[in-house]
Image: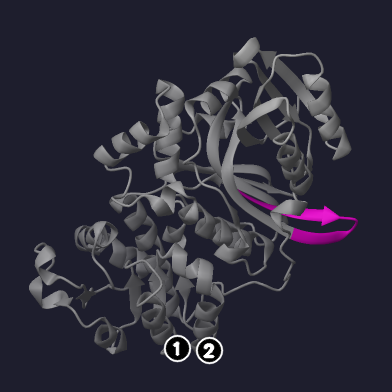
Amino acid sequence: MLGCGTVGAQVVRLLTEQADDLTARIGGSVELVGVAVRRPHRHPDVPAHLITTDAAALVESDVDVVVEVIGGIEPARTLLTTALRAGKSVVTANKALLAEHAAELFAAAGSSGADLYFEAAVAGAIPLLRPLRESLAGDRINRVMGIVNGTTNYILSAMDSSGAGYAETLDEASRLGYAEADPTADVDGYDAASKAAILASIAFHTRVTAADVYREGITSVTPADIAAARTLGRTIKLLAICERVDTDGVESVAVRVHPAMIPRSHPLAGVGGAFNAVFVEADAAGSLMFYGQGAGGAPTASAVLGDLVAVSRNRLVGGRGPGESAYAALPIRPISQVDTRYHVSLDVADRAGVLSSVASVFAEHDVSIAAVRQRGRANDASLVIVTHSAPDRALRSTVDKIAGLPAVHDVVSVMRVEGEEP
């Protein structure tokens, strides 16, 4: 095993406590022969004879399976490609590595016939990737949408329930252990974008990397945004949205991560705290929802152990799990060409003709308005507009031009809207 942090320590515990059950389920015993760490003194609970600081030597030793819970790109990339090329099966929880270098890892696995399993890389304990790779392999998946980052979901849920601001809610999340010391990967959407890339790659049989994913985080979400969503009967969630787009018979894949207002009646709206949930829409299976613990040591270790059982069974019987499926090779559709909807809040002058001038800009860009609400008087006047679906490029151009109107003092917020149209 490479790494022994929060997840790795739980893997060691479960391997020890469930040794007999694992042997019965696999049909043979699994022996942990080494744990590579950088600072041995930080792991007093791991037997000393298992600890090593030489990860490369451990990978090159006579082992059957390498479990990687280090995270990051290097040295994990080098270590895992070395293991796979040597015919050693790999179980990894490394979403960043898979989102950037899955093709390289699968090629290394294919060259030697080794297995590459990574259920723990997305949504923690939730069985999600294997159903996509195997259970739904005979179906056509059209859309995958969900909450795949527990830190941001905790923050947005707390802001919705308490009315508190982003900064103070992030501080609370840090105190409770839901946010890392450096929360950038979570709150800026990088973590969710990596997971979205993995989900889209599997769902649409197309290579999608993190660079292909449009990304926005939650740092600019305000209590005013939360209140505006509540007025519309909605709440705000950071969503990973992967969809198959058909334009005049030509298919493409659009993948995006951003905050969005969703109806409170939507099942995802009720997903609170640090939980994750993902909706899958398929032709034959219809709508499916996967829900559960999206992070944490024990939940993520559960997914790692499930993969370990699978690859161990395969090695015993001479079988092999699924490899990369990228035959469709669909083009990636940029966010500018994706149909979305906007909720726009403006500070405006309270005088005749303001609404007309704003509406004319929407009409100029061929963007249809679904709802308008005007509030306040004099210096506190505001205008809230919700659009129908339109290309994101047209919506963005509309907002940019509105910002320059003499009657518009400020574009207070712009938020995408998902779910049924009014």
Q: CA distance from mark 1 to mark 2?
A: 6 Å
Residue 67 % position (x, y): 34, 71
392 or 405: nearer the viewer:
405
88 or 207: nearer the viewer:
207
* Magenta span main SS: strand
Please give the residue where the numbered disc 2 appears in the rendered image. 111
Which residue is pictured at 67% across the width and 36% down the height? 418
Please give the residue where the numbered disc 1 appears in the rendered image. 85
Residue 160 % position (x, y): 46, 25
- Up the image or down, 395 lies above or below 135; here it is above
As helix, strand or loop, the secondary structure at mark 1 comes to helix
Q: What quarter of the picture does the N terminus occupy?
A: bottom left
- Residue 249 in magenta stretch: yes
- Up the image or down, 345 lies above or below 315; here it is above
Residue 124 appears in the figure: no
Lower sequence index among marks 1 and 2: 1
Which residue is pictured at 55% across the width and 83% down the height? 107
Segment tinted magenta in the rendering:
240-252
CB under 8 Å between discs 1 and 2: yes
